[in-house]
Amino acid sequence: MKLALLSDLHANLQALEACLADARARGATHYAFLGDLVGYGADPAPVLDIVMTLAQQGAWVVKGNHDDAAVNPQPGSQRADQVGGRWSHGRLGRQHRAFLADLPLVVRHGKLLLVHASAVEPERWTYITRPAEATESMTAAQAQQATHVFCGHVHEQRLFYTGAAGRTMAFEPTPGVALPVPAHRQWLATIGSVGQPRDGNADAMYAMLDVAALQLTFLRVPYDWRAAATAIVHAGLPAFNAVRLGIGQ
């Protein structure tokens, strides 16, 4: 199985289509979406149509905080996910909202655990940015017999693992380089954002796991971010949502 791992699509249709085309060209046989399908971008319904079709074909999908906000937006809240959630809520069909509402917070398949944020109380949407947070999430996954945790939420690509002394280490991956992730260690990968990278690079992010070989490859994909930014402006969304696509922030 070659598993394409995609997270934080954020209603960016152009970025999603580019990543899926790249994944198909690399021989992806299965897909996993790690939450925040909507929010920030101009095309929540078309993006969900694609994800829902792939889910019917067997793709795994978990819920993110922006997805939750799009189903049950909190009136008056100025949090980014809630502001975007209110905008998305009115532009989604009943079938889209039902799909988001029914998504699980965690999917486990064999030794793999998929979650939007942390495996520790996933509904709290804890960001994994430091070894301490990664350790807690990997420990929670280990209690569920999982050795590999894949998540999004932080919009950056990073790999954490338990070293020989049992200490959690952080590794900055090079896109396109396959990394061995053997099962005798615990692993946690933040796979980055398809629709809104925040590392100063506009290219979309995703990752590919060769499940049989246990090799993980972080990937970057150029796409037409100008078209996505123009769609945001035409939709009447905040201009910053458009500007940040071009600067990767």
Image: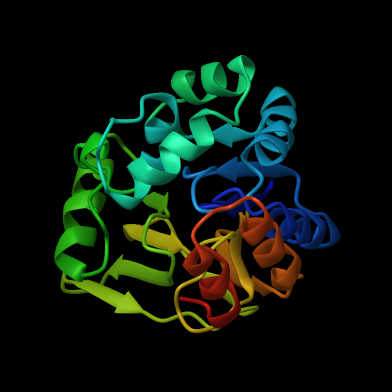
20 displayed left or right of 200? right
Q: Quadrant of the C terminus?
A: bottom left
Q: Classify 142 as above or below 221.
A: above
Q: Residue furthest right?
A: 25
Depth check: give the residue in front, 96 or 177: 96
Looking at the rendering, which quadrant does residue 18 occupy? bottom right
Depth check: give the residue in front, 72 or 37: 72
Residue 44 placement (x, y as % from top left)? 62, 40
> Which residue is painted at 63% across and 61% down in the image?
233
Examine the rendering and report whether any part of residue 200 can be seen: yes
> Which residue is painted at 65% across and 34% down in the image?
59
Residue 197 placement (x, y as % from top left)? 51, 70
Depth check: give the residue in front, 50 or 87: 87
Q: How is the image coloured?
A: rainbow
> Which residue is painted at 25% across and 36% down in the image?
76
Depth check: give the residue in front, 109 or 185: 109
Residue 89 placement (x, y as % from top left)? 50, 29
114 displayed left or right of 128? right
Q: Classify 182 as above or below 146.
A: below
Q: Classify 236 as above or below 56.
A: below
